[in-house]
Image (spheres, helix red, strand yellow):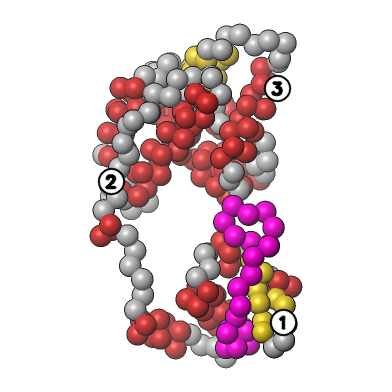
Amino acid sequence: MTLSIVHEVEIVVCTVIGKEREELNEALQTITLVQNNLKNERKEKFYSNYFQRFINDSEINERTSSNYIAYLKHFAKWIQENEIKEPKRQDIRDYKRHLDSMISDKTGKELEQTTKQQYFQIVKTFFQFLENEELYQDITRGLKGFKIDKEERRRAFTEDEIIKIVSSIDTTTEKGKRNKAMILLSVENGLRIIEIQRANIQDLETIDSQTRLYIQGKGKKEKTDFVNLSRELSE
């Protein structure tokens, strides 16, 4: 099968709700995929099944799917503004240069290297998926993304810094106790932000005086893993 991309690349996530659905509707108005040889299938059904497979194959959650939509809407808008109907390899190079000179609306500064790479990597992932499904050639193959300098990566807090942070929290209030618990979950147990956000009081369990917290890890659908808590953190 051969696909022609007209105006922009359409990204459909069937499970998006609320504000995400509004963003999705905007994307649908400006992005269209055309399949020349549909066999006994309505286009609407094809689009729904096709893009749902893209999300499923990527094994991402709703929050990540929202990011996918944002990044690809940006790519789609750029395609439309440049009147590109069938993207070629050179177009991807041009898009990368566009990202490299892009100014953030929020900061008024150039995008961080890590942000540029996120935009570019999602586009690469999408075209890889298109080729795997024999729908469109992967025109991004072999193109390198943005180099991330190791010096730019966030360094870990020192022990003294952690002590200062924790000791500065007013634990006489419920909010203060919550904040201290969240920081200790990160420091002592290495929990990600999303794992801390998903934690509920009913996820705690005490066995032989040892308290554990069941967590829903990144990309997981159930709280099947757990971490053991220190006495201070448990309290």
Write down the residue under mark 1.
Answer: 206
Badge 3 local density, few (<14 within 10 Å), some, or many (20+)? few
* Magenta span contains residue 229: yes
* Secondary structure of residue under mark 1: strand
Badge 2 local density, few (<14 within 10 Å), some, or many (20+)? few
Which quadrant holds the N terminus? top right
* Secondary structure of residue under mark 3: helix
What is the span of residues highlighted in magenta in the rendered image? 216-235
Dot 1 or dot 2: first in sequence order is: 2
Q: Amino acid at mark 1?
A: Thr
Quarter residue 230 falls in: bottom right
Between label 2 and label 3, give the one nearer the viewer.
Answer: 2
Label 3 and label 1: CA atoms lie apart by 49 Å
Label 2 and label 3: CA atoms lie apart by 39 Å
Badge 1 local density, few (<14 within 10 Å), some, or many (20+)? few
Location of residue 222 in the rendering, given as x and y in whole percent from the top left corner: 69, 58
Q: Is residue 133 visible?
A: yes
Residues tagged 1 and 2 counted as in contact (Cβ below 8 A): no
Location of residue 186 in the rendering, given as x and y in whole percent from the top left corner: 50, 72
Q: Residue at x 67, y 44 (%)?
A: 17
Q: Residue at x 71, y 15 (%)?
A: 42
Residues tagged 2 and 3 counted as in contact (Cβ below 8 A): no
Q: Amino acid at mark 2?
A: Lys
Which residue is at the front of the view, 49 or 71? 49
Q: Main secondary structure of the magenta part?
A: loop
Q: Amino acid at mark 3?
A: Lys
Which quadrant holds the C terminus? bottom right
Write down the residue under mark 2.
Answer: 147
Which residue is at the front of the view, 82 or 177? 177
Write down the residue under mark 3.
Answer: 45
Q: Is residue 177 left or right of residue 86?
A: right
